[in-house]
Amino acid sequence: MKASRFFVSTLKEAPADAEVVSHRLMTRAGMIKKLGAGIYTYMPMGLRVIRKVEAIVREEMERAGAVELTMPVVQPAELWQETGRFDKMGPELMRIQDRHERDYVVQPTSEEVVTDIARQEIKSYKQLPKNFYQIQTKFRDERRPRFGLMRGREFIMKDAYSFDRDVSSAKASYQVMAKAYRAIFDRFGLRYRAVAADSGAIGGDLSEEFQVIAATGEDAIVYCPDSDYAANMEKAEALAPQATRPASGKDAVKTPTPGKSTCEDVSELLGVPLSTTVKSLVLATEEVDDQGTVKKVQIWLLLVRGDHDMNEVKVGKLPGFEQGFRFATVPEIEAHFGSKPGYLGPLGLKLPVKVVADRDVAVMADWICGANEPDFHITGVNWGRDLPEPDLVADIRNVVAGDASPDGKGVLAIERGIEVGHVFYLGTKYSKAMAATFLDEGGKSQPMEMGCYGIGITRLPAAAIEQNHDERGIIWPDAIAPFTVVVCPIGMDRSAEVKAAAEKLYDELLAAGVDVILDDRGERPGVMFAEWELIGVPHRVVLSDRGLKEGTVEYQHRRDTAATKVAVQEVAGLVRGRLAA
Amino acid sequence: MKASRFFVSTLKEAPADAEVVSHRLMTRAGMIKKLGAGIYTYMPMGLRVIRKVEAIVREEMERAGAVELTMPVVQPAELWQETGRFDKMGPELMRIQDRHERDYVVQPTSEEVVTDIARQEIKSYKQLPKNFYQIQTKFRDERRPRFGLMRGREFIMKDAYSFDRDVSSAKASYQVMAKAYRAIFDRFGLRYRAVAADSGAIGGDLSEEFQVIAATGEDAIVYCPDSDYAANMEKAEALAPQATRPASGKDAVKTPTPGKSTCEDVSELLGVPLSTTVKSLVLATEEVDDQGTVKKVQIWLLLVRGDHDMNEVKVGKLPGFEQGFRFATVPEIEAHFGSKPGYLGPLGLKLPVKVVADRDVAVMADWICGANEPDFHITGVNWGRDLPEPDLVADIRNVVAGDASPDGKGVLAIERGIEVGHVFYLGTKYSKAMAATFLDEGGKSQPMEMGCYGIGITRLPAAAIEQNHDERGIIWPDAIAPFTVVVCPIGMDRSAEVKAAAEKLYDELLAAGVDVILDDRGERPGVMFAEWELIGVPHRVVLSDRGLKEGTVEYQHRRDTAATKVAVQEVAGLVRGRLAA
């Protein structure tokens, strides 16, 4: 490509609403242009990146045996009503009506449509397994779209759906996709982790997120540097402590803690480690009848160590919490504890509550909790002596760095990541709801076992930038750079030698299949270099009259601090060598 | 591709709602699957065709210097309000609201968004000309979607938009696109015509439609077999007749024509040629004040020969018709003519009307028209003698086959076509409405001159089928076939020789870059052949044990009536030769 025929348009300043570096740099580099909240035009420079991401995904999907189709953006509501999602999904599902006032949705995903296709097309076990995928525009009406392509409303997603005859075949299909995802993410040239994720009500361990490592990532990733253990924070298990509960050494004492309503404040006031305090969280579960009327409310007190955080996903799996839970209201808390929040604890309750202790809390002695009286805590609390043993002991906390790895091979570390892919075993959730069945070898009708597999095509470039940038701009991995090489001639309009050498090099690289752009716009060197550094093209060759007189050009990788002089006849080979590396 | 890894799914029967052959065959061949009215999933077999169409379009757009971007499907209403289209467009514009009750549209085209991009990005004449294009999902809420992909609601369109500094540069950009379109349609391998189209209020001749020739086409295409003249029916000029008006030979006679209210009926009753009758059409134009109140209604009588049809586009350009027109109401007709419709004519009017005669009517003598009295016509009517000369003589009719070609090089013929592309000079309609200006060389702000250029990506395969099919199914041109070659081994599961030879041929063609599919599903020959004939793969090679014993395989083009025996070692070369041809 010659720059004069392309559209290079960079900005000095990022828009005021750009909070994260990828949003700032993609806008400044002319890759995206905001049209509305969370809605962007993919400008020519950005679209090239997206197309390269798509091409890699498509190749690996095909290699893994998935078959591409394209499902509609605008989908009739009927199918979404079959699974109940038309009503159940919140306002992020964009609902629309046509001229005849029939209901439609703008697709956020396509489980319903693909299941409808499968139930029409797949009649026999002989047609299974099958995996359909699409790379298509999606829409989610986020309440607060932000961060550019990181959390847009309109976006491009690759979504694949596998159909299998039984669980073991579905698991094999899942593993084929998980392997394809590793191949895809390897090819992107990004640092990433495949982390075990919670698979919700379906259970099992067949859910993995593909997280691009970035300090700015929204998600906490838990991993073990000494093994291949990796999970997201929701999923990562906090192992039961090795130590047993020590004997009590102190008396329970009601201690004034005026205005100190957090564990941090109390530990600071009393001069004791935060890990000797216990945090009280009050939750409520409800029994609801068929009419949706609440028949009974159960109040729960959950206890985690002051230096730990409660993990809501783990709580949601406790016995009694399967139908969901909520935080208790202040009136509920006052009725049961006789105190406002901030000074709560398991001692001296007004009404019975069920007590769940985290495994680390269950082995504590001489601990500190709220006294159920404003401005007072109790120190030296001990299980069995001062209060009954908890009703339930369970893992209900987030892991922290330094916890033992669940695989027993070291201790856990935590880093930040951006979720860009997800592979998920669905089971028969959709196939049962929509009667997507096939005849097995015995002629019996069976629901298909399904899996779904997503990659955020337009999110990936943003994640790549969060991971790879410096103060001058973006630094693309070769595989997804808008151009791999930029040839920058200085004074091309003045010097016939520079022009000839630049065009020769351009032609040579083009002929070798290199995605090269020749900057023939006649910009001044400073402006030209700054633009390409902002855009982040990884390899640059600069040609000048002075250099050519001594037979050299300058090569510089975007990460290099200085250029390297290279003999003019060797530079194409050098560049090609760097690309192959 | 191996068929076992792909998704081949054909149907014996077409759906009941499939009225046209392309809809029937695309559904039966498993290329599309209906999701809702005018909304289709592009199934794997169909998507391959669409992708090939896209690739050809993309290559030629790039070659012509257009730059690809992708504009959002969901677009904020604000821009559409700037041009007034949000209110002016009918219900085919899909309007939606987000969770905050802000208005959006699902894009039917993107003039507003691209003009908004241009006004932000283009500041100087130095940045012009520019041409942006996208290949993207569109939606039009058709009142009556039908004919499968021919008139769907959701579809894929390539839309390009050129921006220029002045009219002559805009015309040059237009010609570049028109040339690219010819290259694209040549590559599709379809019979097509580029026909001059009406350019509406903008005037000039910078509007061409690209019509795929098909007997089932909705549009009438006018062309001259002896020259390169071609236009659509709206646009094609009916030349002024060479002959001058003959002298009158008959008296005007009021003649009973009971119940004969059409020219056809009258000519049959009287035993005279239809071309001696004159059709009366009563139109009305309105003068409207700023408040939208109608201040004055003008009634017009338009006269065309009985064997001709009025052309509404031509009428819309007559002086006095620029603000639009409508057909007169029955009360208006009765007030002016003293008769109900069916027996109208220009003689003996009750109130004055303005008379417009088609050029062919103006040179008639001794003609027949309604008597403005039910069940009566007048024969032997002559201009000047029986009524004044018309107020206006103009070309207001559709041409008919045999009319002189406007280029003076022969006579016109008419055939049917399907519009799949359109190139159009827009002028400053959008740039003025949206203040998309640039600074010219003198530093003066000027509106950009625009053009727009569309190709119906998903309509093209349907048009291709309307043109190329037989009773067995589709016959794809090589360039856009889902697969170019199918290798059909008979008894692959039983014969190691057949399997080895089929796989060798498959590998050989694949290595030569041929888009080949190997049918390794083990279907019976009859079923297999019927499926591939329905799907329309243009080249087929059949391998069987019997043939291989004598060293031959069978080659058959989809249009051939019989297969040709070819030496097994020569077939790859033969196929490649046929593809290159």
Image (cartoon, coloured by chain):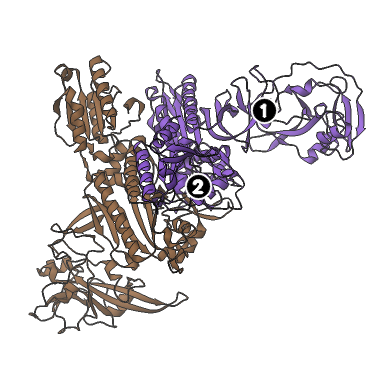
Chain colours: A purple, B brown
Q: Secondary structure at mark 2?
A: helix
Mark 2: which amino acid? Answer: Phe
Residue extending furthest toward the front: A550
Res A305 → quadrant = top right
- Return the chain for callout 1: A
Q: Residue at x 50, y 34 (%)?
A: A454
Rendered image: mark on residue A314: 1
Residue B580 rendering spot, x and y as whole percentages: 21, 37
The answer for which chain carries disc 2 is A
Packing grade of label 1 (10 A; few <14, some 14-19, many >=20) is: many
Image location (x, y in percent) of residue A378:
88, 29
Residue A252 picture quarter? top right
Q: Quadrant of the N terminus of chain B?
A: top left
Q: Position of residue B198 (x, y in %)?
A: 29, 63
- Distance from disc 2 to disc 1, alpha carbons, whole Å, reads 51 Å
Disc 1 marks which amino acid?
A: Lys
Asked if marks 2 and 1 touch (Cβ < 8 Å), the reply is no
* Residue B333 in view (yes/no): yes
Compared to B533, does B23 lie above or below? below
**Quarter-wise, where is residue B201 in the image?**
bottom left
Of the residues tagged 2 and 1, which is closer to the observer? Answer: 2
Can residue A96 be seen at all in this image of the molecule?
Answer: no
Query: To which residue does mark 2 refer?
Result: A529
